Image (cartoon, rainbow, N blue to C red):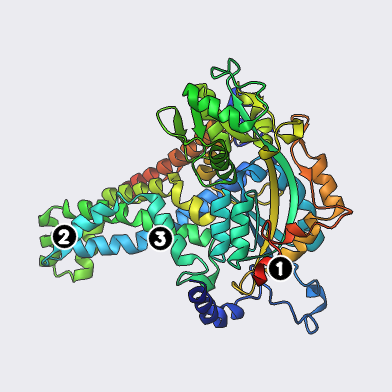
Amino acid sequence: MPTEAIVPLAPALLDVSFREGYVRSIVFVSLYVSVLAVALSTLVSVPAAVAIGLADFPGKGLVKSVVNTGMGFPSVVVGLVVLFAVSNQGPLGSLELIFTREAMIMSQFVLATPPITAITLAAVSGVDDGVRDAARVLGGTRVDVALVVIKEARYGIATAVLAGFGRAISEVGSVLIVGGNITSADGVSKTRTLTTAIQLEARQGQYETAMVLGAVLVALVLTVNAVVVRFGDRGVTA
Amino acid sequence: MAALSAGVVASTAGCSSTDDGDADGGGGNGTDGDESPEESVGVAGETLTLTTTTSTYDTGLLDEIHAGFEEMYGVTVDAVAQGTGAALETARNGDSDIVMVHARGLEDEFLRNGYGINRRDLMFNDFVIVGPEDDPAGIEGTGSATDALTTIAEAQAQFVSRGDNSGTHTKELNLWEAAGTEPGGDWYQETGTGMGEALNIANQQGAYTLSDRGTFISQRSEIDLTILVQGPIEDGPEILANPYGIMAVNPGVHDNANYDLAMAYIGWITSPGVQEAISAYQVNGEQLFFPRAVSEDPDFQQYVPEGWSSDDADA
């Protein structure tokens, strides 16, 4: 029996059968891991990007280059590095994080941080100098200036967060390595995400099923984007 | 190398014993006496991490049988499907508690290095050489797997290799070696993928490949390949046998390994009831795995590296 989640998406593929709750649980794991990783990453990236963007220091260009390079990190390499860290033999081995969602959040945090930082940095740099100067002239502290700049750059920052989310939810290499693509025997995902589920179906030659899951993933990303854009607009009119 | 890892284990022992309490707590259940009544089942609530091969996982066998184990002990089994090489490597790093794989040579190395203990023969099926129905190299009916491979090499017919250090890849390399042929050239492609993908690639390219019978059967309806050289289950050559073994990770090397639960699992899966369930498991109306653990006769070789005897050890 197909679950209700895929029915509207794949009328032609109704014969695709999943155990009850299977798709729901992998959607949950995908969102849980990606949203938490992006939230944590945003908390780190946005302040860091604003600080870099507003400051003038030697080597600023180099820092920008490093951040931009980070956007191209292959996710498999990130997965391997996190694997070495959380493996029993690694520095975090005693925490027993391997094959857990927490390890997946770690690797997605690493993946999402460079794009969020880089795009936020670009957005902050693009804020008109006049706005900054005006805030300063009006007696604003450094924090006030930063807040004004963040407000001016909010669309860019929203784009940055969405780019980070897109990177996190769509990557397969690192979550497969550190998460293990685990589902319990009764068909409830523990560390299986939409992407690793797609990879599993493709491995078994079940391309139709893989396509259905791919459609679910695209729908999910669209929904998240729509929600974020909507919030952004509401922020303007309010 | 062994001494180094033992040192690492010893130095982390202090911290890991403090957080052994719940989910992944390994082996620390020796003192059950003073636990509260509802926790009196030693392993309940724990998690067993099993690294295994894509062929056992993708056929759906593990999902089918694991529910019984989880119910019986009140535990969770985290099955991680990797190739045999990767499954053993994960266990070697102490990241899994038990391994179920199918490459005796690699298993023996794992045992000899001290990482695995209490190995049991579990089940078997066989490998088959599959290819397009028109069989361009003309290997159909060849009684010998090595002759068939030699024929494919001489005809330079397309051959898809797993190329991923899996049990099937290891078997394929052993077969080429036995055939005295060095594979290579445009006709020989290493895909670095799982069995299902390798079958798909072979299907799309009209190529030959070596497959375990289980994965081939479970995918047969999706592809146009056919079995050209049978394995021993269908009276083919014995060299295509595909035995699966199971081993616990040595708690003497990795003290975080959940040894109690691993041994419970080995006892459970080699029991007559579960062996019967493995035998009864079918995909597309065909039996995929043949139980091997229950036997009237002693079989000491299953516990030790193949061909090992205490005389050798003394020498």
Q: Which residue is mark 3?
A: A81
Q: In the figure, is residue A172 to the left or right of A43? A: right
Q: Tell me residue A53's x, y (percent).
A: 18, 60
User: Looking at numbered disc 3 in the image, what kind of residue is underneath it?
Assistant: Val
Which residue is drawn at the image coordinates 39% and 50% (left, top)? A75
Q: Secondary structure at mark 3?
A: helix
Quick check: do tags 2 and 3 share a chain?
Answer: yes
Q: Quadrant of the C terminus of chain B?
A: bottom right
Can residue A149 be seen in this snapshot?
yes
Q: Residue A71 in the image: x percent, y percent?
A: 29, 51
Tags 2 and 3 touching, CB below 8 Å:
no
Q: Amino acid at mark 1?
A: Ser
Labels 2 and 1 touching (C-beta < 8 A): no
Q: Chain of mark 3?
A: A
Residue at 79% x, 61% y: name it. B267
Mark 1 neighbour density, 10 Å: few (under 14) some (14–19) many (20 or more): few
Looking at the image, is A62 positioned above or below residue B124?
below
Which disc is residue A62 wearing?
A: 2
Q: Are marks 1 and 3 on the same chain?
A: no
Residue B42 drawn above or below residue B98: below
The residue beneath circle 1 is B310
